[in-house]
Image (spheres, grey):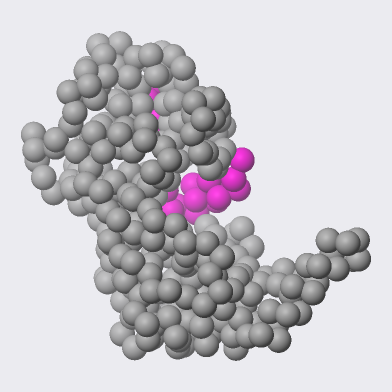
């Protein structure tokens, strides 16, 4: 397996042509992660290209593949294991955000394996063919009758976006759902600042009721994060926002709008996304320790010493 920290223009072109609807495989998204201190790495094995991000600490390092653009073969994974062993990368994460349906063969020393479901709206279909649930339609009509409007905004919309995300996370926690908060993540400002995505908001009388960050590629879009105020919930602002963004993206030539994932433990979120007529895509995510035994023992010894107070 070859790995290049400075990818060539030809590699970027080949990667993006292989998955034009995947917003996590763009140079803009790579730049957003690079500005967070991570090093983009282009993994090349035969004709297959995969974008990864390397994070180095004082003792250990990690490699993260945000989006697998293909179902990894045993041969590809053997190359990945050799790469991590040779470069003393302790922990490796293989994610499937925006990936096609796939499963990941078993890896050595797995730390975690999760089944994932993402929900995708096919924007090549006419809007009349979107199988939107009747309850969702009622919420959309209620928002329209309440004079809710759509606006697109850049960095100045980040504070309201984060506030809306915190509102939604709090409500979901109160319902006992599993919550992965992004409200304080530096990734959101970096995505917007580096042109990897933009913020859409549902507003009324210039008051933000619901907000969504969408990551873009040439023909694909991904619902990165969103949140809604209680007032927005009461008048259907979140339903209006998803539907309005989908229609806007369709008008701009986007073919796929991925509404992101929802865990089996969050049935309410799964229902919310699926009832926009979004089809489920079944994937997996895996974390594993792929480095060699010597480096693995060294890192584990450092962790053990730190736990008992050694610095």
Q: Tell me if I can see residue 248 in this picture.
A: no
Task: Report the residue at 55% width, 50% height from top.
Answer: 187
79 versus 163 height, above or below: below
Q: Quadrant of residue 146?
A: top left
The quadrant of the picture occupied by the C terminus is bottom right
Q: Position of residue 186 (x, y in %)?
A: 60, 48
3 versus 103 height, above or below: below
- Residue 253 painted magenta: no
Task: Report the residue at 54% width, 25% height from top.
Answer: 174
Task: Report the residue at 34% width, 59% height from top.
Answer: 283
The quadrant of the picture occupied by the N terminus is bottom left
Q: Position of residue 2 (x, y in %)?
A: 46, 88
109 versus 100 height, above or below: below
Q: Position of residue 249 (x, y in %)?
A: 25, 43
Q: Tell me if I can see residue 85 in this picture.
A: yes
Which residue occupies the extreme right position in the image?
310
Left or right of residue 97: residue 194: right
- Residue 185 painted magenta: yes
Q: Which residues are magenta?
A: 184-203
| Count of numbered tags | 0
Task: Report the residue at 59% width, 59% height from top.
Answer: 35
Which residue occupies the extreme top position in the image?
146
Relative depth, front residue between 293 and 274 = 293
């Amino acid at each position: 397996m070859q790995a290049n920290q400075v990818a060539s223009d030809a590699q970027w072109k080949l990667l993006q042509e292989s998955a034009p609807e995947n917003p996590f495989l763009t140079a803009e998204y790579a730049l957003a992660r690079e500005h967070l201190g991570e090093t983009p790495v282009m993994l090349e094995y035969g004709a297959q290209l995969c974008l990864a991000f390397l994070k180095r600490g004082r003792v250990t390092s990690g490699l993260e593949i945000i989006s697998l653009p293909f179902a990894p073969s045993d041969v590809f994974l053997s190359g990945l294991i050799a790469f991590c062993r040779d470069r003393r990368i302790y922990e490796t994460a293989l994610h499937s955000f925006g990936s096609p349906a796939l499963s990941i063969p078993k890896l050595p020393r797995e730390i975690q394996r999760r089944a994932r479901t993402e929900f995708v709206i096919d924007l090549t279909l006419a809007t009349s063919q979107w199988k939107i649930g009747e309850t969702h339609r009622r919420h959309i009509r209620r928002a329209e009758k309440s004079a809710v409007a759509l606006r697109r905004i850049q960095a100045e919309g980040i504070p309201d976006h984060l506030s809306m995300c915190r509102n939604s996370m709090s409500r979901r926690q109160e319902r006992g759902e599993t919550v992965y908060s992004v409200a304080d993540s530096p990734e959101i400002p970096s995505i917007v600042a580096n042109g990897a995505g933009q913020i859409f908001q549902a507003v009324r009388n210039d008051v933000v009721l619901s907000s969504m960050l969408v990551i873009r590629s040439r023909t694909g879009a991904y619902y990165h994060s969103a949140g809604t105020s209680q007032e927005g919930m009461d008048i259907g602002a979140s339903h209006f926002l998803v539907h309005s963004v989908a229609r806007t993206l369709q008008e701009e030539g986007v073919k796929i709008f991925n509404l992101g994932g929802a865990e089996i433990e969050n049935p309410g979120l799964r229902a919310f996304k699926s009832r926009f007529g979004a089809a489920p895509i079944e994937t997996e995510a895996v974390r594993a320790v792929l480095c060699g035994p010597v480096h693995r023992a060294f890192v584990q010894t450092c962790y053990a010493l730190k736990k008992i107070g050694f610095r």
